[in-house]
Image (cartoon, coloured by chain):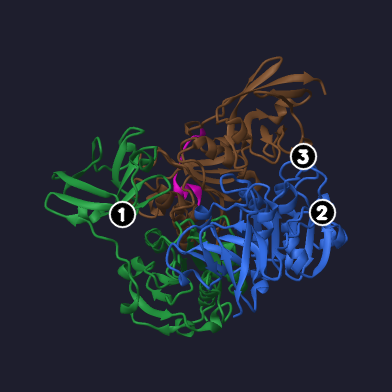
Chain colours: A brown, B green, C blue
């Protein structure tokens, strides 16, 4: 069987407890050859939007034979399905709650299964509270060992998979109204307006007390000045050069952001 | 010599500084074949109770030839001993301050040594402030290389090892009075009442303004409702479905928790 | 080509986002044999002083064929150079902004290059906001694969490298006036006064309401008492035994600290 060597982990478990460590122990037991790599464990508890944003910006930097293990699972213990996907961009193991939406929207799906074969779980009677430990980590480890998708679960149609599509910005002839979809550690406020929507035209964003043209990098403006730019993830973001835009603007996820055309470039 | 491949780390060093990184550098120098796995580094400074709770819930998910390196060490630089244990559940390297109590209570001890052989330390004159770097990490690395317990230290009797046993709940014919022993990242309040104490009987817990029957999973109640259940660790915990019980109840570790019988199941 | 096996990462990216995970994905793609080890990612945003303090206290615990990847980069997207150093203590990849000052001051430099060969970047047109992903991580991975320094960039003279030397304490016949250069996770206030400056003499530090002699370890004084000692890093630090000195003293980085001679030892 063909072994896989990298398993990423993205959860809302935080760093205080041993929940992540426990999952890595299970990986070390079942698939000792595999290397776990943390994407993040500081997703706000049960925040599927933040989880899919972070996953969507990370997985394509990994080898395409990577297994991505995603456990943000507000429905643990209910009838929500546990699933695994095989795509052109790698394998994904997660609850079927929409957290894999970026993968479903952007990648070619080879196969989807519902994880109903308890032989590959840690125990045939999993806890009702921690499927990361009892189902998802063991499944990822068995995948790494070369167990096939159809050994791990029954095929399911792609149409049945839960999706949480990002709200689209409203576009008119003179402006685009989007929202803040994520605020990162630096306080950068990242919108749902994509770089592609801004081509062929100069744009500016109206903040409370100033208009900021959409520029190129933090260093384009003085320290302490607001900057609007396309981040490395491809979305329009509002940042404060050498500072924290969120702390100054007091914005939250969901805040409406309006940009207007200024001149043809 | 028989090499060991996994070394876990559990400390109160936090993630801000390079104390953990320094220990991993020493592991990489002495035992480059070994893989370090973080359990957690966010134990509250010097909190031996949180350390033993987290250790006790994690080590048994790892291969039994794992080395568990535990550095929560309020007595560093005093005469407290540095010890290593070899048990049926793996190796443990730690200060002798009670942090290994769950291991001593639940596992078969093959050998205990006090780490008095400075040949295996980073330096024969260790600092008085950071034995994680100067003693514990090098010892774990030498263990990983196959150095034997008795090369690393002098055997000591199990009776001499410091223990910090968890206070037991008070059990009467109609109720059990326990305490909160740990509050996790999600705000789940975990008591010292074990699943075994609840069998054969239905129970409920009296909170400030409501009685909550001890149920099965978060999804059994509506979002925002209190839930009392047996967590994946085997202890009774009080949680808020899709919320933070600690933030709502304002409980702290040590809070008394009373549960009462409601009917025979 | 001679492969290198350990790559450390030190950034101000925090643990909330996937910026670090993305860099590790690139390392896994280009240099799958290499092991990434986190030094810390909780440097305060753009804090070059904290970054160099932490780097300076960690790198010499690693094998001398380690690659240290440092991305604290307030000037990203401007004309500041990206550099790599080969020294007797290992390889360093970082922006040329002074963050490598401890290495330049303490180690033998074999070669310095400016990273101007875009063939070894992730993309010939890097983003203006995230060179950790687009330049620094790929360069570190290629170094790990045995690509030579001069393949990665053009040699530059050591004199051209930016340095941020630590301010030196003022020394008079009776006292030394230093400053707090770093405050760690435990609240220990670490000064810029080195152990070597205290030899041959007994010293004390004057705090608001007490004089504390410079002692040996936390356990020398009662729990809750202030302690002044030489930390494992070699600097004079002020700590609170089993407590948090920063929280009690309300000191910040830059606080002046005066120590006075008390008697010849």
Which residue occupies 62% across, 68% down? C260
Question: Which residue occupies the foreground of this view, B58 or A71?
Answer: B58
Which residue occupies 34% across, 65% down? B102
Q: What residue did someone put label 3 on? A: A219
In the rendered image, the residue lying farthest to the top is A173
Q: Which mark is residue B234?
A: 1
Q: CA distance from mark 3 to mark 2?
A: 20 Å
Q: Is residue A252 magenta?
A: no
Is the N terminus of chain C in the top left, top right, bottom left or bottom right quadrant? bottom right
Question: Which residue occupies the foreground of this view, C61 or C163?
Answer: C163
Residue A142 drawn at (x, y percent): 48, 55
Quarter occupied by residue A82: top left
| Residue C13 is at least partly visible in this image | yes
Q: Nearer the viewer, mark 1 or mark 3?
A: 3
Residue B239 drawn at (x, y percent): 34, 42
Q: Are marks 2 and 1 on the same chain?
A: no
Which residue occupies 61% across, 51% down? A65
Instruction: Find out whether the residues at labels 2 and 1 contact each other: C-beta distance under 8 Å.
Output: no
Q: What residue did someone put label 2 on? A: C115
Q: Is residue A154 magenta?
A: yes
In the rendered image, the residue lying farthest to the left is B173
Tag count in the figure? 3
The answer to whether C161 appears left or right of C166 in the picture is right
Q: Are marks 1 and 3 on the same chain?
A: no
Count residues near mark 1 (Cα–Cα under 10 Å), then give few for <14, some for 14-19, many for 20+.
some
Is the C terminus of chain C in the top left, top right, bottom left or bottom right quadrant? bottom right
Q: Secondary structure at mark 2?
A: loop
| Residue A31 is at least partly visible in this image | no
> Bounds of the magenta span?
A147-158
């Amino acid at each position: 069987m063909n072994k896989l060597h990298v398993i990423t982990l993205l959860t809302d478990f935080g760093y205080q407890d041993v929940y992540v460590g426990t999952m890595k122990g299970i990986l070390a037991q079942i698939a000792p050859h595999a290397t776990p790599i943390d994407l993040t464990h500081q997703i706000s508890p049960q925040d599927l939007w933040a989880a899919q944003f972070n996953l969507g910006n990370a997985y394509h930097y990994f080898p395409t034979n990577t297994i991505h293990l995603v456990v943000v699972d507000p429905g643990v213990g209910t009838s929500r399905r546990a699933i695994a996907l095989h795509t052109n961009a790698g394998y994904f193991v997660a609850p079927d709650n929409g957290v894999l939406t970026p993968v479903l929207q952007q990648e070619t799906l080879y196969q989807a299964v519902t994880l109903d074969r308890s032989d590959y779980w840690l125990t045939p009677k999993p806890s009702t509270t921690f499927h990361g430990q009892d189902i998802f980590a063991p499944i990822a480890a068995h995948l790494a060992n070369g167990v096939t998708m159809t050994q791990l679960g029954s095929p399911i149609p792609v149409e049945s998979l839960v999706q949480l599509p990002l709200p689209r910005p409203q576009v008119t002839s003179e402006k685009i109204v989007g929202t803040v979809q994520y605020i990162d550690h630096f306080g950068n406020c990242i919108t749902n307006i994509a770089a592609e929507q801004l081509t062929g035209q100069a744009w500016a964003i109206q903040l409370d007390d100033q208009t900021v043209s959409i520029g190129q990098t933090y260093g384009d403006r003085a320290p302490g000045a607001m900057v609007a730019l396309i981040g490395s993830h491809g979305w329009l973001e509002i940042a404060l050069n050498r500072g924290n835009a969120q702390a100054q603007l007091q914005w939250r996820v969901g805040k409406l952001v309006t940009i207007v055309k200024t001149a043809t470039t």
